[in-house]
Image (cartoon, rainbow, N blue to C red):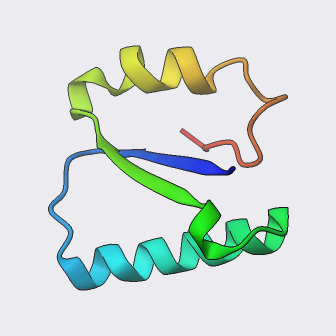
Amino acid sequence: MPHVIIKHFPKDLDEETRARLAARVSEAVQEAFGVRAGAVSIGLEPVEREDWDAEVYRPEIAGREDRLIQFPDY
């Protein structure tokens, strides 16, 4: 079933913001894949700013246009 990981610079999100983010992402995934809400899992994975290039950009973004559905402009 669909599993979404959101990697981001560390930021404390309050419960309301986390719930709103989860609901919006889950709704989009449910619609796109035709699954029920209980089939979707979503994780938040903070990555330090100084580690972003080595841990996220180079291994998961750069040169992976074939797998990304949105490419960053940085």
Position of residue 48 measured from the top left corner of the image (x, y, whole percent): 21, 33
Up-down relation of residue 39 to residue 53 (above or below): below
Of 9 and 29, which appears nearest the observer? Answer: 29
Dividing the picture into quadrants, the one containing residue 40 is: bottom right
Position of residue 68 measured from the top left corner of the image (x, y, whole percent): 74, 38
Residue at image location 67% in from the left, 51% down from the top: 2
Total marks placed? 0
- Asked whether, in this view, residue 14 is left or right of residue 58, the answer is left
Residue at image location 55% in from the left, 50% down from the top: 4
Position of residue 59 measured from the top left corner of the image (x, y, whole percent): 54, 15
Residue at image location 77% in from the left, 68% down from the top: 35
Up-down relation of residue 74 to residue 26 (above or below): above
- Asked whether, in this view, residue 69 is left or right of residue 48, the answer is right
Position of residue 10 measured from the top left corner of the image (x, y, whole percent): 20, 47
Dividing the picture into quadrants, the one containing residue 20 is: bottom left
- Asked whether, in this view, residue 44 is left or right of residue 26, the answer is left
Of 39 and 12, which appears nearest the observer? Answer: 39
Up-down relation of residue 74 to residue 54 (above or below): below
